[in-house]
Amino acid sequence: MVRLHMKEVLVGVLRKPDGAALQMARAETFRLIGAVLTCLNAHPLDEKGWCPACDSADCGLRRDVRLALLPFDRVVDQAGRHRLSS
């Protein structure tokens, strides 16, 4: 369900006119931040940096979020073609 929702948001932001895309992006920003924080709160690190949920010092969820938020040098345009971001 979450994947479908995120797909619909991405398609809407990419294909709708700028005004509608901006409104959609603004509306989803707080929901997205809330979802990420909820997930991270389920994987709290202890004072030694250990994640009890993953039973590891390398929390898989935190690693995935960190990698997903890295800057990227390519974006997908509205036609679905990759192009270098400026």
Image (cartoon, rainbow, N blue to C red):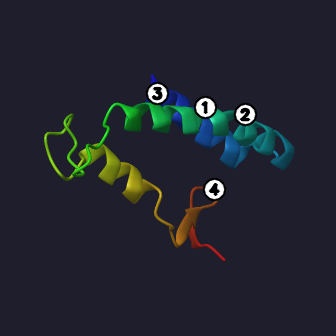
- Circles 1 and 2 in contact, beta carbons < 8 Å: yes
- Residue under the image location 40 percent in, 50 percent down: 65
Please rate how many residues cluster around mark 2, counting C-alpha atoms within 10 Å: few if below 14, some from 14 to 19, many from 20: few
Mark nearer the N terminus (1 vs 4): 1
- Circles 3 and 2 in contact, beta carbons < 8 Å: no
| Distance between mark 1 and mark 4 Cα atoms | 26 Å
Please rate how many residues cluster around mark 1, counting C-alpha atoms within 10 Å: few if below 14, some from 14 to 19, many from 20: few
Q: Tell me the kind of residue under disc 1.
A: Arg
Q: Quick check: 16 above or below 72?
A: above
Between marks 3 and 2 in the image, the one whose residue lies nearer the viewer: 2
Q: Which residue is mark 2?
A: 27
Q: Position of residue 4 (x, y in %)?
A: 49, 28
- Kindly state the secondary structure of the residue where label 1 is placed: helix
Q: Position of residue 15 (x, y in %)?
A: 70, 45
The numbered mark at residue 31 is 1
Q: Which residue is mark 4?
A: 79
| Distance between mark 3 and mark 1 Cα atoms | 11 Å
Q: Quick check: 73 above or below 44?
A: below
The numbered mark at residue 2 is 3
